[in-house]
Amino acid sequence: MAPGADRSALAGDPRFFQRAGPHSLAAVVDAASGGEVGAATAPSQRLMLHGIAPLATATAGDVTYCLNSRKYLPALAETRAGAVIVHADMRDRVPASSVAIVADDPQVAWARVATLFHPLPPVSPGIHPSAVVAASAQIDPSAQIGPLVVIGENAVIGSRCRIGPLVVIGDGVELGRDVRIGPQASVTHALIGDRVYIYPGVRIGQDGFGFAITPEGFHTIPQVGRVVIEDDVEIGANTTVDRGALEDTVIGAGTRIDNLVQIAHNVRIGRACVIVAHVGISGSAVLEDQVVLAGQVGVAGHLRIGKGARIGAQAGVMADVPPRAELVGAPAQPVKAFFKEVATIRRWVRDGGVPRVRDSRNAKSDVD
């Protein structure tokens, strides 16, 4: 164990995370947004909960949760938590020593309860003395501007924004309300909505990868579009979002983007999409609402992925994808077709090689 580590503080170590509480059982139920207390005794109604913890390590002062899956039943049976958030189907499985908090979606309820115990630190309004702020920039008095931040001409910083150390905000950039930007990120040529979280190291608004090929070599094409990020978007650490060439690069409201993602110029991403780490989206591709791209997916340029489509890890998307399709593989194809091919290849390997079949001239030939 590392020096100074405290086993009792593995969840929400106060050195790194702000803590609130203790909270009454009633307050926790309220935070779970309509959760119902199951099998609560009179003493349990007076229960005070001090923190959150996993099923296996929770104590009588902790609240925990259990997903609605049989594989978690052994851990649920052994938990010593004071309260457990569960689906109604699991209510009777909660030990007598714990209070069951019943919720339609235990994971959502858990997220709200975790926020109750570990709220975001409050914004500390003001501009750090080491920050460099252009005279024409408009900064709301409630915003927090950290050390060594650079804010360009005519930039607009909305209310309660938190700008971390060493961030660069370019000329003319506009940030809405409650935007958080992590250390060493840079934002240029961009209009940012409300409650957007830009994690450390993100690069938004740099030149797109555009050039013409001439006999003398490459000729860079000016990238004169913008990046438009709508409300409630999160962009993970070290992700890059290129500005548009002529049109805007757009990220729709509520979308979640993981770390280390590349989004090229003119890409348009719809609402509530999920884009996992190491995805690369080529220029002018369109993702409609609620698309999911798993890790390391590659998307070719100038194509459209329909609403609700789900693309499996490491897939290569090289053609338009219809709505609600589920694709895997490279090149990407429907899940059933992909696994049928995999089964066929495995059968060939098992049988010692590719079978030989007769072609239309009744001559033997290998299957391509």
Image (cartoon, rainbow, N blue to C red):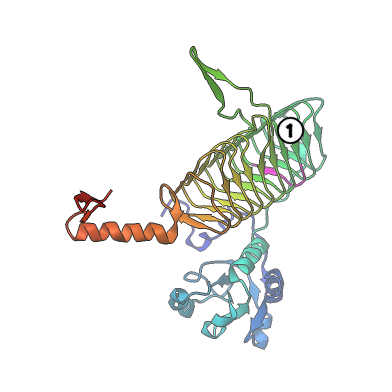
| Residue carrying label 1 | 173
- Give the percent coordinates (x, y) of residue 40: 64, 85
Q: Main secondary structure of the magenta part?
A: loop
Residue depicted at 44% across the width and 53% down the height: 333
- Residue 137: horizontal and vertical position, in percent? 80, 29
- Which image quarter is the N terminus in? bottom left
* In the depicted structure, whether residue 12 falls above or below residue 147: below
Pinpoint residue 112: horizontal percent, then vertical percent: 66, 64
Q: Is residue 311 left or right of residue 187?
A: left
Q: Hey, which residue is sitting farthest left in the picture?
A: 352
Residue 237 visible from this viewpoint:
yes
Residue 162 found in image quarter: top right
Which secondary structure lies at badge 1?
loop
Q: Is residue 64 above or below residue 115?
A: below
Residue 83 seen in render: no
Q: Amino acid at mark 1?
A: Val
Q: Residue 151 in the image: x percent, y percent?
A: 72, 29
Furthest-front residue in view? 361
